Amino acid sequence: MAEVSTGWAFVWVIGSLLGGGGMTFLLLMLRDRARRTTAQAETDRLIQSAQSRAQEIVRAAEVETKATFLARQEEFEKQASATRNEIREAEKRIDKREDILERKLETLAIKERNLEKSEAANKERQAEIDRKAQEIEELVAKRRTELLRAAQLSPDEAKKQLFTQLERDLERDCAELIEKKITTAQEEAEAKSRDIVITAIQRYAAGHTSASTVSTVDIPSDEMKGRVIGREGRNIRAFEKVTGVDIIVDDTPGVIEITCFDPVKREVAKQAMNRLIHDGRIHPTRIEEVVAEIQASMEKELQEIGKKAALEANIQGLHKKLIDLLGRLHFRTSYGQNVLRHSIEVAYLCQVMADELKLDGALARRCGLLHDIGKAVDHEVEGGHPAIGEEICRKLNEPEEVLNAVAGHHGDVPAKTPYTPLVAAADAMSAARPGSRRESLERYIKRLEQLEGIATSFAGVKQAYAIQAGREVRVIVDPENIDDANAHRIAREIANKVEEEMTYPGEVKVTLLREVRAIEYAR
């Protein structure tokens, strides 16, 4: 029994060991499976995280790529816009040069025709001189023969022959006197024609005068308005007292207004206000300091501007006071046109016309530059700017031609010299130039539209473009409906309709384009 018990005990131990080993193996397998499951989940999580990160990177790359593309597109558009602007400016310069070249070619053609006429006249005169020299030689030989024969004539026959010769001499002297009178009449006619040309130029003159009396100053906030006004208005009163201007502070956001008839005082006040707002220290003492500094620098600036204007117009020997007044004209406007630039332009126009009329170009430039000098002080002195300018120039010993041009360029006094109507005409041309003044801009655009509308109203016309400030219209026709024979007819009809329906200075050139160009002029 004991042996049997021992055997079962051994079997039980073995079984227990085997069972324990199996359980251990089973537990190890379960733990390994759990680890593999956890590792698989971690692997999946890492893969999912990596995919999410990759998607974020892709999205960020797309956003960055789009931003870079938009930035480069914007830069390209800016460059393209700048290039287009440069092309437009180049086209404007080319059109202007073409216009100048056409005028020069016309002038050269006129001079060439005059030269040809002069050469023909000289040839005729030379032929006449040669003929007369030959007649004199023949007359001397004949006289010698007659004298030899007269020695054998009776007194009555000699007297009769002498009277006959005297009659012939008298007829020759009368012919020479008539020729001299004709030459004198031609010279007087030339002088008279010059006066007629000047009078015709004068008929184009028209006067305009206006002034801008308000400037605006930007302010960063409404709180700054309160600082400008100051406690109980002490800052604004101090500013107005020192500068001599009026300050308007109303409900308009972001700006205050400065009003004054004196453009220089208004400019000084504007610069002083901008400096005070930028500095932030606004009180009466600081206001006086800033205004004094601006006034001192403004005096120097006026002299520099006046000297540059005189140099640009090539005028020598101007009085210092006149140079200062020219600088003041830089801050004066008339219908939006800067008066100083207008005066320089008038000076050059006067020189061009004076040169064509064989007058003194330098004196004409001086008259043109100083014609509006009275506008620099017309807010301080009573009267119109022509009378004021004449008084100033008289005190500063300007020539009589300048005095009459300044006083009479608006027809206030009679023209005593040919330079006065030249200044009047140049003044009107500068003021009426398209784009020079705000009021003429709208009419200028309407005139271009009307010109194109007239051209496109004809059958067979596809497009029409007004160019060179309305001095030419380019008409493009349908080559299938308009042949070469009708091209000149349509161009002539367009020119006639332009003459009937439009008012314009000078002439309008009609250029019709098909396979050939037919050009007519509306005068």
Image (cartoon, rainbow, N blue to C red):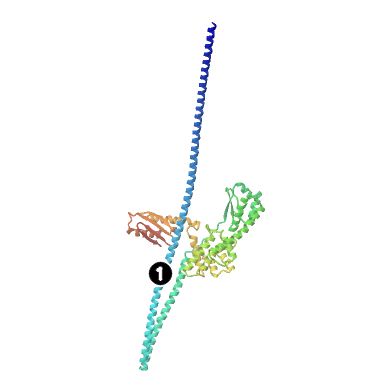
Where's residue 6, x and y in %?
54, 9
Where's residue 355, x and y in %?
48, 68
Where's residue 44, x and y in %?
49, 29
Question: In the picture shown, does residue 8 fall above or below 367?
Answer: above
Task: Compare residues 431 and 320 and report the one nearer the observer.
Answer: 320
The residue pinned by badge 1 equals 113
Question: In the picture shown, does residue 363 fall above or below 82?
Answer: below
Q: Residue at image x 50%, y 41%?
A: 64
Q: Residue furthest front?
A: 3
Residue 382 visible to an observer of this rendering: no
Secondary structure, mark 1, is: helix
Q: Quadrant of the C terminus?
A: bottom left
Where's residue 154, x and y in %?
36, 94
Question: In the picture shown, does residue 362 fall above or below 501?
Answer: below
Residue 368 visible to an observer of this rendering: yes
User: Label 1 sits on what residue type?
Assistant: Arg
Q: Residue at image x 50%, y 35%?
A: 53
Q: Quadrant of residue 493?
A: bottom left
Q: Residue at image x 44%, y 65%?
A: 104
